[in-house]
């Protein structure tokens, strides 16, 4: 089972570069495969606000 509804996951893209997102279940984040931005997920609701997203170091 994913972090978010699979129908939602199918349409969501990175709010910054519109790249595809992958779910990191252990960390409850959606990570952009293109730019690496990480969007937090709380109770199945992804926070797609770029200002709230973080970039992994390195
Ligand atoms: Zn991106």
Image (cartoon, rainbow, N blue to C red):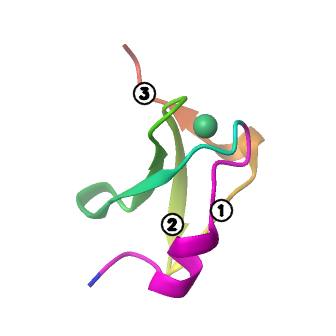
User: As displayed, is residue 22 above or below residue 42?
Assistant: above
Name the residue that disc number 1 marks: 47
**Circle 2: element type:** strand
Magenta residues, start to end? 2-16
Prevalent SS, magenta region: loop
Residue 58: % across, % down: 37, 13
Dot placed on the residue nearer the N-terminal end, 3 or 1:
1
Dot placed on the residue nearer the N-terminal end, 2 or 3:
2
Residue for point 54% across, 86% down? 7
Residue 21: % across, % down: 49, 53
Label disc, if present, on residue 41 of the rendered structure: 2
Residue 48 covered by magenta stretch: no
Neighbour tally class for label 2: few under 14, some 14-19, many 20 plus, Cα within 10 Å: some
C-alpha separation, residue under disc 2 versus residue under disc 3: 16 Å
User: As displayed, is residue 3 above or below residue 56?
Assistant: below
Name the residue that disc number 3 marks: 56
Neighbour tally class for label 3: few under 14, some 14-19, many 20 plus, Cα within 10 Å: few
Residue for point 28% across, 64% down? 25
């Amino acid at each position: 089972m994913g972090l978010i509804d699979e129908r939602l996951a199918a349409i969501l893209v990175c709010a910054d570069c519109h790249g595809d997102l992958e779910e990191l279940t252990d960390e409850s984040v959606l990570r952009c495969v293109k730019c690496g931005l990480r969007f937090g997920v709380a109770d199945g609701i992804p926070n797609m606000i770029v200002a709230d997203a973080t970039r992994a170091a390195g």
